[in-house]
Image: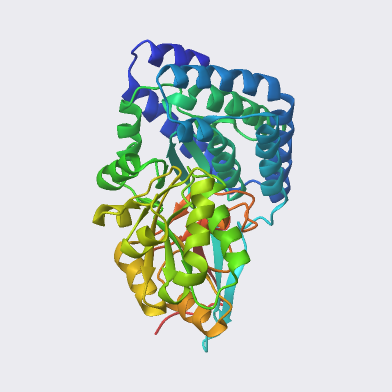
Amino acid sequence: MKAHLEKTEAGGDVAALMRDMGRRARAAARALALAAPAKKTAALKAAAAAIRQSASAILQANAEDISAARADQATPAFLDRLSLDDNSVAAIAEGVATVAALADPVGEVTASWRRPNGLRIERVRTPLGVIAVIYESRPNVTADAGALALKAGNAVILRGGSESFRSSRAIHQAMVRGLESEGLPADAIQLVPTRDRAAVGELLSGLGGMIDVVVPRGGKELVGRVEAEARVPVFAHLEGICHVYVHAPADLAMAKEIVFNAKMRRTGVCGAAETLLVDRALIATHLKPLVEMLIAAGCEIRGDEATRAADKRVMPASEQDWTTEYLDAILSVKVVDGLEAAIDHIERYGSHHTDSIVTQDKTAAEKFLQEVDSAIVLHNASTQFADGGEFGFGGEIGIATGRLHARGPVGAEQLTSFKYRVHGSGQTRP
């Protein structure tokens, strides 16, 4: 791998490198598809241990990435996504260990039935094959994607962002040591060893049939390019325009906690709320306290006329604000005329990612959960639960907002396909 890195960083043949990676990934995928569940579990446990043992090297690599990003005047939100510390490295290792402990989805019989002619048919989970993951500044994706792909019996080719290049490489090296210690092929988890953007184009081409699916994790520009250029299936979301709707009746204390967490816990994640909708019946009781709380926390508010009337510090919202993923301490706020208006707003402006209603009215909550067509819909909970780890998946390879194959957090189970096994006793078709 080091030889590949030196060659490509010096301007070598990226296309040849990527084709070779594809061939090696396909061979590794075959071995993984046949690997015993216990062997995959042991390899992931060893990878988690290797990450813990490599914490100093990972943090040193991350410090170099952070220094370079600051020199390039990266935004605070970007630095937040890029930064690692002792706790986050421990969390990365724990995430891999959690994936190791999950039930193995490969070989699971999801349905079984017998036909009148005596044939017994089973539908069984199988790996997808080779997955390409293209991501930007979050180095933890290296471990999450590698672990989940391997658990589901897939080989994976990871192409991290140039800004997190050193951090991702250090995490990847630790994971490979874990795999090799348990006899699994190092090529099961490969990291593209060059920052050359041509590598992305090669992955999107499918590497001559070697890639089965592409998963992009990053900003709108990256995801848009992948969806436009990929010649293989894509699991992705273009934007996370997430809403919190405070409906009457809603407990004010609960609403404040949920809204604050949804927006301010981490402003740069795709599950961060970007628009707050407040029921018109709550203008006198809830709107002003919510706005004041957010402004006091350093959040810029862009609101409609009713919101601006509640606090003169609110900036006027434009039509564009309702379709903007800020990924920053900025929130658009709108007063709506009831539940139907809130659902209509979300349908018109949302991205089908994650939306939440805060209410004590169970009937209204059920209507919201049923009619809002988003991958994740919540009642009385923060949108920042849009995370595979929080769903018990051990992590996620991404969030999918499409309607085919996978939707919402993509964990190990969602990284499988299926086949039919048919058991007969000599039957022939007339």
Residue 360 is situated, as x and y percent measured from the top left of the image, at 59, 78
Task: State the count of labels.
Answer: 0
Q: Residue at point 47% right, 39% down?
A: 26
Q: Can residue 110 be spotted in the picture?
A: yes
| Left or right of 388, for residue 373 | left
| Left or right of 407, for residue 321 | left
| Closer to the camera in the image, 400 or 191 | 400
| Closer to the camera in the image, 372 or 112 | 372
Q: How is the image coloured?
A: rainbow
The C terminus lies in which quarter of the figure? bottom left
Q: Is residue 407 above or below residue 182?
A: below
Q: Can residue 423 be spotted in the picture?
A: no
Residue 229 is situated, as x and y percent measured from the top left of the image, at 26, 43
Q: Residue at point 51% right, 17% down?
A: 67
* Residue 210, image quadrant: top left
| Closer to the camera in the image, 323 or 302 | 302
Residue 341 is situated, as x and y percent measured from the top left of the image, at 35, 75
| Left or right of 262, for residue 239 | left
Q: Residue at point 32% right, 57% down?
A: 322
Q: Is residue 366 above or below residue 353?
A: below
Residue 334 is situated, as x and y percent measured from the top left of the image, at 37, 63
Q: Is residue 321 above or below residue 197?
A: below
Q: Is residue 344 above or below residue 241?
A: below
